[in-house]
Image (tube, rainbow, N blue to C red):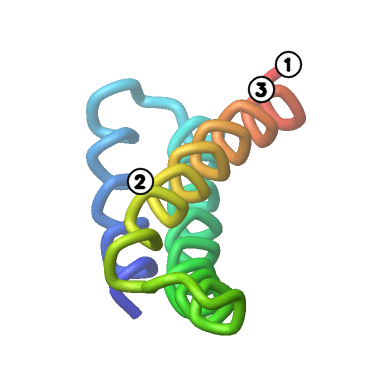
Amino acid sequence: MNGVIFAFLLAGITYLWFHDAKLSLVIGVALVFNFFCAGLAGILIPLGLKKAGADPAVASSVFVTTVTDVVGFFAFLGLASIFLL
């Protein structure tokens, strides 16, 4: 729900700022997708590290942040290239 609320809020701000419905849709969808993947990574990476014998509290933050940044970057640019070009 957090992702959907923030997506609507950011999509509305984007529409008010740029007056472009496609751009606001791309940003909203990319944000929901990024939040979903961040939540999934936040669950699966610590579990995988624990299973591998590493301390999940120490090691997982770097991996979760990397996954979130990469997915967010490619989700926004991928959707923008599909819908806006």
Q: Are marks 3 and 1 in contact (CB under 8 Å)?
A: yes
Residue 25 in the image: state x and y as whole percent.
51, 44
Residue identifier under label 2: 11
Who's the residue at 55% across and 58% down the image? 33
What amino acid is found at the position of numbered circle 1 in the picture?
Leu
Q: Are marks 2 and 3 in contact (CB under 8 Å)?
A: no
The relative height of residue 38 versus residue 16 in the rendered view (above or below) is: below
Depth check, front residue: 26 or 74:
74
Instruction: Report the label total.
Output: 3
Who's the residue at 73% across and 16% down the image? 85
**Tag 3 secondary structure:** loop
What amino acid is found at the position of numbered circle 2 in the picture?
Ala
Label 3 crowd bin: few (<14), some (14–19), many (20+), radius 10 Å: few
Query: Gap between marks 2 and 3, in whole Å?
Result: 15 Å
Residue 61 in the image: state x and y as whole percent.
33, 57
N-terminal of the two: label 2 or label 1?
2
Q: Is residue 17 left or right of residue 84?
A: left
Q: Is residue 35 left or right of residue 13?
A: right
Query: Gap between marks 3 and 1, in whole Å?
Result: 4 Å
Who's the residue at 46% across and 75% down the image? 46
The N terminus, quarter of image:
bottom left
Residue 62 in the image: state x and y as whole percent.
37, 48
Residue sticking out furthest to the top: 85
Residue identifier under label 3: 84
N-terminal of the two: label 2 or label 3?
2
Q: Is residue 56 left or right of residue 43?
A: left
Residue identifier under label 1: 85
> Residue 78 falls in which quadrant of the image?
top right
**Tag 2 secondary structure:** helix
Label 2 crowd bin: few (<14), some (14–19), many (20+), radius 10 Å: many
The relative height of residue 78 versus residue 45 in the rendered view (above or below) is: above
